[in-house]
Image (spheres, rainbow, N blue to C red):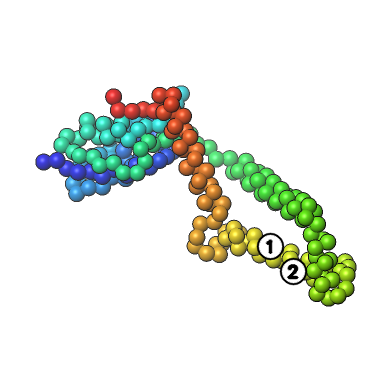
Amino acid sequence: MTDIIYLNLSPKMQSTHSQITVNDVAEVTGKNKELMEKVRQVPVYQFQEDHTRRIVSQLKIISCIEKACQSVMVIPLGAREVILEYSSNPKHNKAWEILKVIFVSCVSFFGTGFTIMAFHNDIGIREVFEQISSLITGEAGRGMMTIEIAYSFGLAAGIIIFFNHIGKRRITHDPTPIEVSMRKYEDDVNMTLTETWDREGNIIDAP
């Protein structure tokens, strides 16, 4: 009797151990619990010291499972290739991470500020405010106008609402634009890596 196993592959995984098993790269489900545990322990790749990244095809993983487990039908789901990344001794330098956060924050803050000021200078926002103030009050605007203060608060509120974030708190449960952009960027990077390695014939495939 043939048992059916469903395999939901992840597009990318990171590991600190050199031997990669099915459990590292996919979710396994089926009716035969004992077989599921056996499939999870099937090795699919062994990293060497000079290798830190490899791409393994869906067919290669299925081939490994079928060799290790007899009378099993594997139904693959999810990604067609899995990007494997290996680091034997990952080190996290807290001070370096804090410096990077400070640097990125400064670049984002001052860069955005400069962009906004350059845009306002380009369209002549001061003259626009003076004209609006003159139309409403009948007098030429002088010094710091109320409309400028209101515009500044409105601009800050618009940025906060758009990015859906105040510190560590979200305004809504929806993903922020930055999270959406980062996810798209990650997907593009994974797709580019896979296509490049496939062109070069470096993807680990079934024999």
Image quadrant containing the C terminus: top left
Residue 29, given in percent of the width and then of the height, sits at 26, 47
* Residue type highlighted by circle 2: Ala
Residue 111, given in percent of the width and then of the height, sits at 71, 48
* Of callouts 2 and 1, the N-terminal one: 2
- 26, 201: nearer the viewer: 201
The numbered disc on residue 150 is 2
Query: Who's the residue at 80% across and 74% down the image?
Result: 136
The numbered disc on residue 112 is none
Dot 1: within a 10 Å radius of its alpha carbon, few (fewer than 14), some, or many (20 or more) residues? Answer: few
Query: Who's the residue at 59% across and 58% down the image?
Result: 163
Secondary structure of the residue carrying numbered label 2: helix
Dot 2: within a 10 Å radius of its alpha carbon, few (fewer than 14), some, or many (20 or more) residues? Answer: few
**Residue 65's quadrant in the figure?**
top left
**Residue 128's quadrant in the figure?**
bottom right
Query: Who's the residue at 33% across and 28% down the image?
Result: 205
Query: Which residue corresponds to mark 1?
Result: 156
Q: Using the numbered discs, state the Cα–Cα distance from disc 2 to disc 1 in whole angstroms.
A: 10 Å
Q: Residue furthest bottom?
A: 137
Q: Residue furthest left?
A: 1
Query: Who's the residue at 80% across and 65% down the image?
Result: 129
